[in-house]
Image: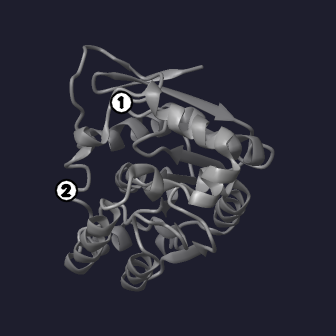
Amino acid sequence: MPHVDSDGASIYYERHGEGPAIVFVHGSGGHHATWWQQVAALRAEFSVVTLDLRGFGRTELSKPQAEFDGQAFYGDVVAVLDQEDLRDAMLVGQSIGSVAALRAGLTRPERVSSVVLGHSLGGIDHPELKELAAADRAEAVKLPVIDRLLTKNFRTERADLTFLFRQMGTFNIATMQDLRNLDANGPTLDEIKESGVRVAFLAGEKDAVLSVKTVTRAHELLDGSHLEIVPGAPHSMYWETPDAYNSAVARLRRTLTKDPKDSI
């Protein structure tokens, strides 16, 4: 499978299937293989691209690093977009991956038609949204990490997939402690609108990290954005409720493109 150079890192990625491109950008405990349920379900209709950000999975570093700068992640996504010469791609971020996805989309609007912010505000620079997200985080940190990510019922009924979920993160070097500045200097609402890149917010009703109230407010503030709230889904919707997640992603890929006014 291919690698592409990105500022001192050799980014590992995979491409499966044919058709309109969907590029998945993982979260803090993930890597390319966390999308196994998405690749299997979507590759018959779409070109599905998965990748490992620096410090994650099979991505290789030119020299050892003890910590990672989340500000560099978007460049890893851009490198894959350029290497594969993608056009009209939809970037789908999961949690922290949404921040990298949004920045990559705004950096390469000629390659990216839409960005789906999964369980995240994508680092949008807006005072009200920052306040709301901070309040959500203050409640989330009171919970054990696994309670923030998967529901208790799922962990009881699917001990096998819960174990695999925990194991996924053991392949990574980077940790959440490395990502403190990830959403600093994010784009404004005006910058997003001016880019012509369409944005969708995708969240779960039972997300313990980012509330439906906060995501809904972000949608209200970002004119032209789309909102998908999946009933009963947790923060790691892609893992726990993959059928609903895959359906939402496929529906967005079929319908989202740049604003027609931008091509006039």
Residue that mark 1 sits on: 54
Q: Tag 1: residue type? A: Arg
Q: Are marks 1 and 2 in contact (CB under 8 Å)?
A: no
Where is 81 relative to 8, above or below? below
SS for dot 2: loop
> Which residue corresponds to the image point at 53% horizontal and 70% vertical from the top-left?
206
Callout 1: 10 Å neighbours few (<14), some, many (20+)?
Answer: many
SS for dot 1: loop
Percent x, y of residue 238: 61, 53
> Which residue corresponds to the image point at 42% horizontal and 55% vertical from the top-left?
95
Residue in front for this viewpoint, 234 or 104: 234
Callout 2: 10 Å neighbours few (<14), some, many (20+)?
Answer: few
Query: From mark 1 to mark 2, how far is it between C-alphas?
Result: 18 Å
Percent x, y of residue 17: 74, 38
The answer to whether residue 65 shows anywhere in this view is: yes
Percent x, y of residue 258: 53, 67
Quarter residue 126 falls in: bottom left
Where is 259 relative to 85, above or below? below
Relative horizontal placement of residue 62, taking residue 163 as reference (left or right): left
Which numbered dot is residue 263? Answer: none
Where is 64 relative to 34, above or below? above
Task: Give whichever of discs 1 and 2 has the lower sequence position.
Answer: 1
Which numbered dot is residue 184? Answer: 2
Residue in front for this viewpoint, 210 or 84: 210
Q: Tag 2: residue type? A: Ala
